[in-house]
């Protein structure tokens, strides 16, 4: 890799459209596909999604937990999925939401952000709620490896508000503080920094938050959670050009037919581009 993650993502978004498709092989979805809830079903599901999507979407986002639940054999499937997706041209963000301190955080970072790791991904989701500074080992290794981070800032789950909207002594909310940290990480980077935020597309008016962090905004909530591409300009305002909407069930439920999966992804991508281009 000759470019940092933010630059590579910007190029991929411009070339393929700003869509991230999740790889979420939970038991009910495997059943919808007519697959058994076992390693063979997991492998069939994951390989089908990669085959259908990796040569046409900007990012794929495997949810690590759905692979981990099968133990070492599930992790082996995850390793192969990451390898094949990246070989086909998709960027991979590992949705593991890791967060800890010191040497433990460093070990989590090495698992997903070290170039020699079998799980090396283009980016990793992380939780900053042991303090943003606890992410320092991941930030440092991401810079060294040309990878990126997506930091949980304003998440789409209702429970998140009790932490993320809490007001600090300086008058800023916790979520706003995380956004400010990311803006500082990305300062001066062109065409876009590598340190992004997770901001839910279901959150409505976010005009009180400064989303101009000069980095990507991973936006879950499109499709099954109720948000639509048309909502993006209202939620993200002037920062909408850096939004990477994530769609999982809205696409995956069209499987296991590869053509149907591609058609669903293409439809979402077209709607997203149309919504964003009007801003």
Image (tube, helix red, strand yellow):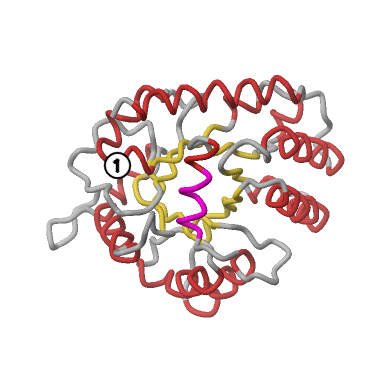
- 79 and 271: which is toward the camera: 271
Q: Is residue 141 above or below residue 38?
A: below
Q: Height in image: 150 above or below 257?
A: below
The foreground one among 262 and 43 is 262
Label 1 residue SS = helix
Dominant SS type (magenta):
helix
The picture quadrant where one finds residue 170 is bottom left
| Residue to which mark 1 is pinned | 239
The residue depicted at 54 percent of the width and 32 percent of the height is 247
Q: Please give left or right for residue 179 compared with residue 62 in the image.
A: left
> Quadrant of the image for the C terminus?
top left
Indicate whether residue 148 is drawn in magenta. Answer: no
Outermost right residue? 40
Residue drawn at (59%, 27%), measured in percent from left and top?
265
Q: Give percent across and percent down for residue 202.
A: 37, 31
The picture places residue 135, in percent across and down from the top left corner, at 43, 69
- In the image, taking residue 176 as reference, residue 33 lies left or right, namely right
Q: Position of residue 4 (x, y in %)?
A: 50, 63
Left or right: where does residue 201 sit relative to residue 82?
left
At a point 65% along the width and 49% down the height, the residue shown is 65
Picture quarter containing residue 122? bottom right
Residue 106 vs 38, above or below: the answer is below
The magenta stretch is 5-12
């Amino acid at each position: 890799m000759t470019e940092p993650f933010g630059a590579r993502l910007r190029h991929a978004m411009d070339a393929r459209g700003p869509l991230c498709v999740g790889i979420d092989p939970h038991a009910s979805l495997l059943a919808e596909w007519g697959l058994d809830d076992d390693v063979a079903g997991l492998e069939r599901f994951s390989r089908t999604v990669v085959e259908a999507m990796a040569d046409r979407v900007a990012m794929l986002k495997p949810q690590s937990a759905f692979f981990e639940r099968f133990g070492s054999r599930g992790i082996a499937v995850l390793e192969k999925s990451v390898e094949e997706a990246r070989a086909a041209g998709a960027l991979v963000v590992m949705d593991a939401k890791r967060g800890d301190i010191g040497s433990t955080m460093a070990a989590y970072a090495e698992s997903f952000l070290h170039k020699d790791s079998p799980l090396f991904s283009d980016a990793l989701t992380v939780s900053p709620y042991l303090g943003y500074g606890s992410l320092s080992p991941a930030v440092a290794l991401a810079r060294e490896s040309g990878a990126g981070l997506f930091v949980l800032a304003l998440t789409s789950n209702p429970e998140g508000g009790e932490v993320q909207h809490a007001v600090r002594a300086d008058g800023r909310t916790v979520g706003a503080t995380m956004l400010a940290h990311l803006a500082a990480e990305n300062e001066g980077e062109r065409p876009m920094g590598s340190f992004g935020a997770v901001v839910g597309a279901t959150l409505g008016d976010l005009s009180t938050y400064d989303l101009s962090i000069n980095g990507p905004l991973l936006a879950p909530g499109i499709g099954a959670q109720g948000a639509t591409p048309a909502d993006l300009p209202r939620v993200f305002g002037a920062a909408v050009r850096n939004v990477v909407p994530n769609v999982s069930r809205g696409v995956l439920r069209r499987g296991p037919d590869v053509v149907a999966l591609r058609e669903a992804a293409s439809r979402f991508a077209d709607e997203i581009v149309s919504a964003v281009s009007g801003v």
